[in-house]
Amino acid sequence: MLLLADSVLHPWMVDFATVFGVVGTIATLIGLALTWVQVRGAKKAAEAARDAALATAERARHEYVRFVISTCHRFVSEIKIYVQAEKYEAAAFRSADIAGQLILLRVANPELGDNFLDKIERLREWEQTFQQAAGAGQGLSKNSRAKWGPFHHSLASAIDNLHGPFAATEGGE
């Protein structure tokens, strides 16, 4: 080394500035390597935290969809009971409730697409029909009764396809 030969004290003696310079360079390189390792570890930890948060959010959404489907299933059963008992005001409320739940279901589960748009529209129409039947005090007309059965059956079937332990609501889950 050229610095060793220029030493004033002895050919083997090195001044403190040179020693500190070499030691400082080595320490800087070691610190840089440690920093790089820690940054990689922090990056992996941040990615793991992000993945865990996304998985938790997806699970919460999945559970919410299951809750909404169960609620719809119960409401469909109740509306059938109300119509059979000729409690049309309650049937109107349940029609509105089911329509609202199906809207929430579409928002929470975009995979459903537009499958329930027609049913939501028809439920709104049935809400009006039930309100008119309740207000008139005469019940449903023969024509309305004939239409109600098939609609109720198609609505119940559509919700039943989403309900239950083996129903595929999201990617086969």
Image (spheres, rainbow, N blue to C red):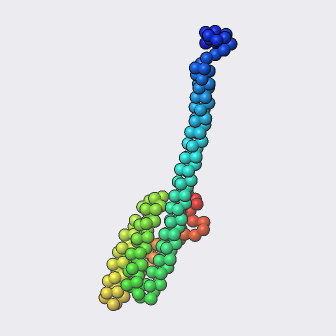
| Residue 152 figure quarter | bottom left
User: Is residue 115 among the parts visible in the rendering?
Assistant: no
On screen, residue 46 above or below 83: above
Query: Quadrant where the C terminus lies?
Result: bottom right
Query: Quadrant where the N terminus lies?
Result: top right
**Which of the two residues, 24 or 137, is positioned nearer the viewer here?**
24
**Which of the two residues, 56 or 18, is positioned nearer the viewer here?**
18
Q: Position of residue 99 (x, y in %)?
A: 40, 71
| Residue 166 figure quarter | bottom right
Q: Position of residue 92 (x, y in %)?
A: 38, 80
At a point 54% along the width and 69% down the height, the residue shown is 163
Q: Is residue 141 left or right of residue 40?
A: left
At a point 44% along the width and 88% down the height, the residue shown is 85
User: Is residue 39 among the parts visible in the rendering?
Assistant: yes
On screen, residue 101 above or below 14: below
**Which of the two residues, 8 or 110, is positioned nearer the viewer here?**
8
Q: Position of residue 169 (x, y in %)?
A: 53, 62
At a point 34% along the width and 86% down the height, the residue shown is 134
